[in-house]
Image (cartoon, rainbow, N blue to C red):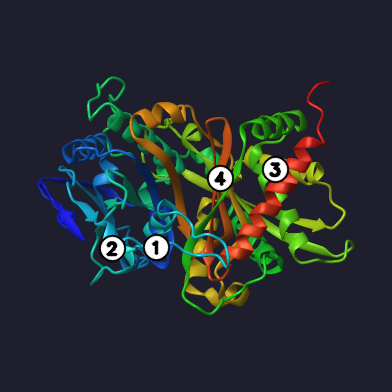
Amino acid sequence: MDKISCATSGGSLGGRTSSRSAGGTELSWCRAVPGGTGITVLALLLSRSFPFPHLRDSLRRIQFSYPILRARLPSAAAASSGVFSPPILVSSSPSDEIELIPDDRLPAPAVIGDSSPVSLFHSILESEMNRNPWAETADGEALGSLFPTIYDLPEPDWSVLALRFHTGVCDRTTGVAILKELMDLMGRAGERDDEGEDGVGDLILPIEDLIRKDDSWKPFWARAKDLIGYSLNGLRSNGLPFEDAGSPRHSEVVRLVVDAEETQQLLGACHTKGVKLCSALTAAGFLAAYASKKLNNNQAETYSVITLVDCRKFLNPPLNDKHIGFYHSAILNTHTVRGGDRFWELAARCHSAYSNAKNNNKHLKDIDELNFLMCKAIENPHLTPASSLRTALICVFEEMVNYDVPMEQLQEFGIEDYVGCSSVHGVGSSVAVFDTIRNGQIDCACVYPSPLHSRKQMMEFVESMKRILLEGSHAVDLTS
């Protein structure tokens, strides 16, 4: 494999630098990513050859607009030192380094039993989520936050462009914004106007520094109570059966796709029932997990869900989608499920639980507690079931992503497919659902740790989720 570097390399800061102290959430990601959770990948399948200078210039413009993408982040050792908050260093010059991988060095497609192998695009996406430069830093060296790679495919002019980010600088809102901007720049051969970018290029403070004191304050005893509550709920939570808890892990993906007609039915049913899609996905995941164990109907299981909330609009000052970084927080809820539970009743319970927590500002008040518990799980995996580092059954996003650019238009530019998701084979849930709507269809990337869970197991689990969702939506009359 080759690396083309037209100016500053990825291993050098180059030129002037600016800096600020890393926030608590950013430091937590600096400890989590080396273990395998939080490698965010944006992958585009391209059917025509894009001139290399156009790709390079597009990436340069994005890095110029968003300084945090030029950052070098503290190592796990520096992040866990506890003596002081280490700095995030930002170069004045973007990196021009792009790795090129020829078609004779592509990752081998995985095969599931007697089934056909997954596509090369799928294999490359999975391979990128498991390339972890942040796990290999020597002597606590700070490392960059963005690694672009171009994979040449066997078909003439076809390739895959993959952008690999450290999640400490790239939450899902950031990933979507960068993906949309990159597709726009590529579609216009690297040209763009600068309208609407005033002030976006500033280095923004971390999430903890932008929360109003009234929104984050709670007494010490309440923090201690919440820590104990979260810990006890974690100990009594159930999950999917583990197939191999002893072998080294990597992240794999199963895609859940619902056609346009069924998508409209499902979204209409969610609206009628007064729940968001994330709650329907959670309920379907709970019921699919329960069904997979073939329990008696009177047996109860306890499942946990992590709901990720984009906090930008709750901060002071409020941020928008063009403010790049990690500004999500988590709400952790636990639910008891029995065999007789009905889908929409369970979805309503899930919706009510996270909505009540959000109304009580738990997404702002409990950031420190959940960061602390995540780091304690990393330090003490034996405190999690079978040392699996699983902290919940499922992770969902409060708001779905709706890509409003028609696929036909993207195909005119040579973009045939695209996926954005993050690795979970360190600490995290058994499955993380990255839900989007594209061309009117629900298209979810469901990421899971393997071989803790096998591809066959997760394909069956996701197919069961889809069946539960569609059966539930068909039971709702949208005509009345």
Whole-number angstrom distance, CA of label 3 to CA of label 1: 29 Å
Foreground mark, 2 or 4, reads 2
Contact? badges 3 and 1 (CB < 8 Å): no
**What amino acid type is highlighted by mark number 1?**
Asn
> On the image, numbered disc 4 is attached to which residue?
444
**What amino acid type is highlighted by mark number 4?**
Cys
The image quarter containing residue 200 is top left
Residue 472 visible (yes or no)? yes
From the viewer's side, name the closer residue of 15 and 451. Answer: 451
SS type, badge 4: strand
The image quarter containing residue 452 is bottom right
SS type, badge 3: helix
Contact? badges 3 and 2 (CB < 8 Å): no
Q: Earlier in the sequence, mark 2 or mark 4?
A: 2
Whole-number angstrom distance, CA of label 4 to CA of label 3: 13 Å
> On the image, numbered disc 1 is attached to which residue?
130
Whole-number angstrom distance, CA of label 1 to CA of label 2: 16 Å
**What amino acid type is highlighted by mark number 3?**
Ala
Using the image, tell me which numbered label, if any, was put on residue 411. Answer: none
Q: Residues within 10 Å of mark 2 (few under 14, many from 20)?
A: few
Whole-number angstrom distance, CA of label 2 to CA of label 4: 28 Å
Rendered residue at 22%/34% (across/down): 61
> On the image, numbered disc 2 is attached to which residue?
105
* Residue 468 spot, x, y in % from top left: 74, 47
Contact? badges 1 and 4 (CB < 8 Å): no
Q: Earlier in the sequence, mark 1 or mark 4?
A: 1
Foreground mark, 1 or 2, reads 2
> On the image, numbered disc 3 is attached to which residue?
280
Above or below residue 153? Residue 441 is above
* Residue 442 spot, x, y in % from top left: 59, 38
Task: Tally the marks.
Answer: 4
Q: Earlier in the sequence, mark 1 or mark 2?
A: 2
